[in-house]
Image (spheres, rainbow, N blue to C red):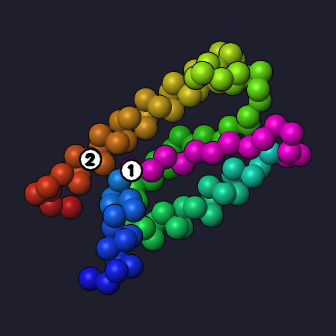
Amino acid sequence: MSRHEIQRTRLLGGGPVPGTGRSAAEMPGSIGTAVMQSSMRSVLSFLDAPQLNSPEAYITFKPEVFPGGGVVTDDSTKGFLTHYMNEYAAFVERVLAVNAPGHIG
């Protein structure tokens, strides 16, 4: 096994990865996170990292919605993020179960 293969395995090692990002509200269009997520999918696939493909999260950062300390002031955003994290938690459980020692594909 080459050093590159060993390092690649250590970086993500089959661990689950969410597809999330955020764009700054002051940027016109705020599509930076969508472009980044699209580009990252091929990189993560190469690294053999299981990806949560749905739901996707494209978050526009607004200080009034995310004032700090884990607080989310917008109920719609809070509901979406709660749903997203529940889906991600279930995804992590599925990935870990499949990657358990002795599991055959």
The span from disc 2 to disc 1 (Cα, nearest Å) is 8 Å
Name the secondary structure under disc 2: helix
Q: Residues within 10 Å of mark 1 (few under 14, many from 20)?
A: many
Quadrant holding the N terminus: bottom left
Do residues under tags 2 and 1 come within 8 Å of each other at their CB atoms? yes
Foreground of the two, 93 or 70: 70
Q: Is residue 83 visible?
A: yes
Instruction: Tell whether position 70 is magenta.
Output: no
- Which residue is under mark 1? 16
Of residue 95 and residue 23, the one placed in the foreground of this image is 23
Query: Which residue carries the number 2 mark?
Result: 96
Q: State the image quarter where residue 24 is shown.
A: top right
In the image, what residue type sits under mark 1?
Answer: Pro
Image spot of residue 11 (x, y percent) = 39, 62
Relative to residue 13, is residue 36 drawn left or right? right
Please tell me which of labels 2 and 1 falls first in the chain.
Answer: 1
Instruction: Identify the disc placed on residue 29.
Output: none
Q: Does residue 34 appear left or right of residue 102 in this picture?
A: right
Q: Position of residue 65 (x, y in %)?
A: 72, 22
Question: Looking at numbered disc 2 in the image, what kind of residue is underneath it?
Answer: Leu
Residue extending farthest bottom: 2
Q: Residue at x 38, y 70 (%)?
A: 8
Q: Which residues are magenta?
A: 16-29
Could you tell me which residue is drawn at 38 percent across and 59 percent down? 12
Residue 27 place in picture, x, y as percent: 86, 45
| Figure check: 28 above or below 39 | above
Q: How many marks?
A: 2
